[in-house]
Every structure is written in C-alpha cells, then in structure tokens.
Amino acid sequence: MIIPPQNAFFYKGRWNPRTNELVLDTAIRMRSDHPWPEDNIPETVAFEAGATIEREIRVQLTPIEVNQRQMIMHAPYLTFKDVVTTTGTCWVPDMQLVVVDYTVWQEIIKTHPFAAANYHRDEPEYEKLCILFDPSVGNLEGK
C-alpha cells in the first residue's frame, strides 16, 4: 500500500498540530467548567479557541473556521475509534500505539479509507478527542 504521511490527511493551510491542540484544550477546559450534552459544542468554544490561537501563535481564525475544524476533527475521531475497536487490533495506551497486522490494516482501509491517515502514526490527540466527543469514554487508560 502506498500511503502518504498523516499530515497530508489532517493539516492544510493554517491548520497544524498546534492549532488542533489549542482547539481541543480550549474545548475540554470549557466543557469541564460548563458541561454540555453529547457532541453539541457551544458556539462560545469557537470564539474562545480562536482567541487563544490568535494570542498564542498569532494565527487568525474566524469562529466559523474553528467550528468547521471541530466538525472535521469528529470524522478522524470516529474513524480511529473504529480502528482501535476492530477485531485484530490492540490499543496500547501507555505507548499511544495501535498494534495491527498488515492484513488487518488492508481490510480496515478498504472499509474506512480515511483510516489510512493512521497507518504511519496513530491519532495524536485521540484521548482528547474522546473527552470532547464522547465524555463517557474519558481517559482510555485500562480500556
């Protein structure tokens, strides 16, 4: 299989690992202060995350762009969740690593083409995405 590096799937334009991290950290902090139901992220999160990104790394993003990014982050979260729960995979939380046989990867990628983003590297923010999109899962330690 010829699979591009993870950055080719996740980051374009002004979006990079640090901007994603700031969005997630802001949303998680705000959720812990004022919980909201399910994955219905309040608009105030986009305003606060945008302000944080501008203050910390001098990148200007509109609340609409931040909201769109949160929706975009949901797809890789769901895909990676499917990867780690597929029979034949083993999630190693301490190492932030999914152990998968090559033939299982081939089947996963046929079913979920976006899963190829995780072939060379696991989802770097999976635990934070779980906290944001599925707070009942929370921390994956021991799961």
Image (cartoon, rainbow, N blue to C red):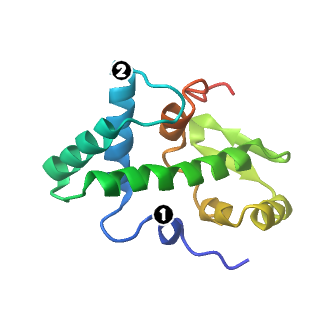
Farthest residue toward the bottom? 2
**Where in the figure is residue 35, as x and y percent of width and height?**
42, 21
Give the quadrant of the N terminus.
bottom right
Tell me if residue 121 comes above or below residue 1 in the rendering. above
**Where in the figure is residue 118, as x and y percent of width and height?**
62, 59
Residue for badge 2: 34
| In this view, the mark in front (1 or 2) | 2
Binning the other alpha carbons within 10 Å of mark 2 as few (below 14), some (14 to 19) or many (20 upward) gives few
**Residue flagged by tag 1: what amino acid is it?**
Phe
Residue 111: quadrant of the picture? bottom right
Residue 117: quadrant of the picture? bottom right
**Residue at mark 1 to residue at mark 2: CA–CA distance:** 29 Å
Give the quadrant of the C terminus.
top right
**Where in the figure is residue 10, as x and y percent of width and height?**
48, 63
Secondary element under disc 1, as helix, strand or loop, is helix
At 34% from the left and 28% from the top, the residue drawn is 29
Front residue of 56 and 33: 33
Residue for badge 1: 10
